[in-house]
Image: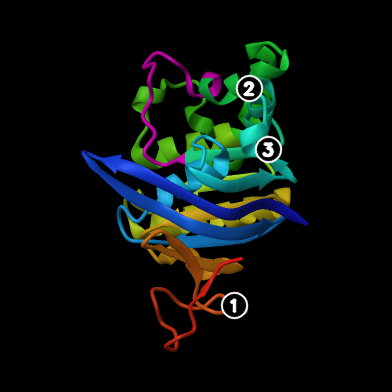
Amino acid sequence: MTLLAFKGVSKSLQDGARSVVVLDGVSLEVEDGDVVGIFGERQSGKSTLLRVMAGIEPPDSGVVSFEGKDLARLSTDERARMWNHRGIALVRCDWRPVRSNELVVEYVATPLTAGGITLAEAETFARPVLDRVGVLAWADQGTDRLSLNERIRVELARALIREPRLLLVDEPAILAGAGASRELYGLLRSLAKESKMALVIASEDTTPLAGVQRAMRISDGRVITTDSRRRVVPFPERRRRGSDSRAS
């Protein structure tokens, strides 16, 4: 089943007085349960692609649909419901705590309060999720005391508590240490399998793409596979000449 679809999506951003094309007529699909890796150099448009996927930024043209619904046509309430439960969650690995006095368990539990339950009730759901991602020991600590690796796991827990059908993870390669990176990538893939959710990882590092079902590359505004049959092959650009094809 197609979960997310891009049809001819284009997006430009302003760089001073210059308009830069970030997405140029991109068409792609993410199926239910897919584990997809998107490789791109720094400032290639990976983060913009994920924000458009999440419905946070609208495309300039084209259609982005989730579960068959055009994201641009959703009402404010419908969009909020999509982000808060069984929809799309975006994990930004550059997250920094805004409120230094907020406890980790409160930060992770807060999204559930949009559904009408109290924060105390939501915290009972947050603790098992924190345990699953390996940071339960930090539940009652302030978010400002977390290391980079711990912040990423806490942000992941805040996404997972909403039980998303599509989880987007932006640049997990900023983790310190190859061992920590491999551990996180393994966790992401196991979570996707257990929860039967689709997972999209965007990275300038090729490491997390080793275990994905489908790999893509973003360059010059285009999202392309390295094989017309969508097989996962090593990145970057280890392919026969002429094998690129626009993802569909």
Depth check, mark 2 against mark 3: the one in front is: 2
Instruction: Measure the C-alpha gap from mark 2 to mark 3.
Output: 14 Å
Q: In this rendering, would 177 be left or right of 128?
A: left
Q: Secondary structure at mark 3?
A: loop
Residue ID at (67%, 24%)? 75
Say whether residue 205 is magenta.
no
Please tell me the numbered disc located at residue 87.
3
Instruction: Give amino acid for label 2.
Output: Thr
Looking at the image, which residue sits at the far bottom? 240
Q: Is residue 133 visible?
A: yes
Please tell me whether the stretch drawn in magenta is mainly helix, strand or loop. Answer: loop
Please tell me the numbered disc located at residue 31.
none
Q: In this rendering, would 20 be left or right of 131?
A: left
For marks 1 and 2 on the same chain, the one whose residue lies earlier in the sequence:
2
Residue ID at (50%, 31%)? 137
Please tell me the numbered disc located at residue 76.
2
Say whether residue 102 is magenta.
yes
Q: Which residues are magenta?
A: 92-106
Residue ID at (56%, 31%)? 158
What is the quadrant of the N terminus in the image? bottom right
Q: Which residue is mark 1?
A: 231
Q: Secondary structure at mark 2?
A: helix
Q: Residues within 10 Å of mark 1 (few under 14, many from 20)?
A: few
Instruction: Give amino acid for label 1.
Output: Arg
Instruction: Give amino acid for label 3.
Output: Gly
